[in-house]
Amino acid sequence: MYVEAWRKHRAGAALEALEAQIAQVIEEHPEYHALLDIPEASLRAEFLPEGGAENPFLHLGLHLAIREQVATNRPPGIAAAHAQLANRLGSVHEAEHRMLEILGEVLWSAQRDGTAPDEGVYLERIRNLAGKLGGCNA
């Protein structure tokens, strides 16, 4: 889906709504453009954490998840926490990066424990991060 959305975007082709969202997130990550420009390589690549490789598809997917959470305000309060964090950091994109680290940790913990992700813990950690930043711009 990522490779196809990026290909269509680069070709100037019409995009479905989800493809447009994917292309926008990819556009914001130039470090992934070369990989996605070569579909065979991107689909064969292995992104092993023990080798220090970040999985671009996971990273982009977490951006999309956060945008969906903010758009639907689920969990309740996430849109306000996101706005506060973006305001304090001076960047929506940087706020998403901070949030996706937390989201990834919460999802990993849930998977490890065999439980559903704890929305309360997730929201509390994001609110705590925004509070720690105070009124400064990083």
Image: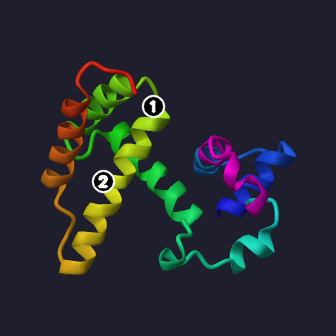
Tell me residue 18's x, y (percent). Answer: 58, 50
Type of the residue with mark 2: Ile
The residue depicted at 31 percent of the width and 31 percent of the height is 85
Q: Residue at x 15, y 45 (%)?
A: 124
From the top left corner, tell me how far across and down residue 53 is, in percent: 56, 69
Residue under label 1: 92
Mark 2 residue element: helix
Where, by quadrant of the figure, is residue 57 drawn?
A: bottom right
User: What is the magenta segment's predominant secondary structure?
Assistant: helix
Q: Is residue 128 left or right of residue 7?
A: left
- Residue in view at x 19 percent, y 31 percent: 131
Q: Is mark 2 in CB contact (under 8 Å) with mark 1?
A: no
Label 1, secondary structure: give it.
helix
Residue 78 part of the magenta segment: no
Q: Position of residue 22 (x, y in %)?
A: 60, 50
Task: Reply above or below: 38 against 66.
Answer: below
The magenta segment is 23-35
Residue 2 percent coordinates (x, y): 65, 60
Q: Is residue 24 a member of the stretch shown in magenta?
A: yes
On residue 102, the disc is 2
Question: Which numbered disc, 2 or 1, marks the residue that appears first in the sequence?
Answer: 1
- Which quarter shows the C terminus? top left
Q: Amino acid at mark 1?
A: Val
Q: CA distance from mark 2 to mark 1?
A: 16 Å
